Image (cartoon, helix red, strand yellow):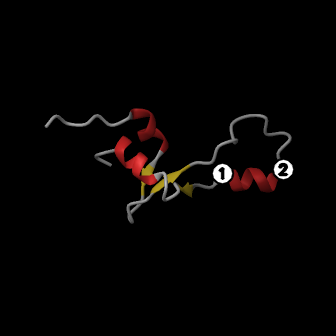
Amino acid sequence: MPKIKTNRGAAKRFRKTASGRFKRAHAFHNHILTKKDAKRKAKLRATTLVSEQDTPAIRRLLPYV
């Protein structure tokens, strides 16, 4: 059986946690930040977990993580 390639785009966007879930960054925090209030921008800075429904797809993209 051949080895599976890691999806390099996904490898840069997701990190695995100790419990086996995946961390991700929030979207909408790159530009046009002047109209977003400080509270919203602070929440977008924090990381969050990938939803349970999306985790199997991420696991297929990152087989060796």
Work out which quarter of the rendered image holds the N terminus and state it.
top left
Front residue of 41/4: it is 4
Q: How many marks?
A: 2
Q: Position of residue 63 (x, y in %)?
A: 30, 45
For mark 2, does the 10 Å Cα neighbourhood hold few (<14), some (14 to 19), or many (20 or more) residues? few
Q: Quick check: 5 above or below 14?
A: above
Front residue of 20/41: it is 20
Asked whether disc 1 touches disc 2, contact meaning CB atoms under 8 Å apart, the reply is: no
> Label 2's element?
loop
Real-space CA distance between mark 1 and mark 2, rounded to the nearest whole angstrom? 13 Å
Furthest toward the bottom, the residue is 19
Furthest toward the front, the residue is 53
The residue shown at (28%, 46%) is 64
Judging by the rendered image, the residue that carries numbered circle 2 is 37
Amino acid at dot 2: Asp
The residue shown at (63%, 55%) is 46
- Sequence order check: which comes first, mark 1 or mark 2? 2
Residue 22 found in image quarter: bottom left
Q: Is residue 53 left or right of residue 16?
A: right
Amino acid at dot 1: Arg
The residue shown at (44%, 50%) is 15
Q: Is residue 58 left or right of residue 31?
A: left
Judging by the rendered image, the residue that carries numbered circle 1 is 45
Q: Position of residue 33 (x, y in %)?
A: 79, 39
Front residue of 36/59: it is 59
Q: Is residue 36 left or right of residue 61?
A: right
Q: Position of residue 62 (x, y in %)?
A: 35, 44
> Label 1's element?
helix
Furthest toward the left, the residue is 1
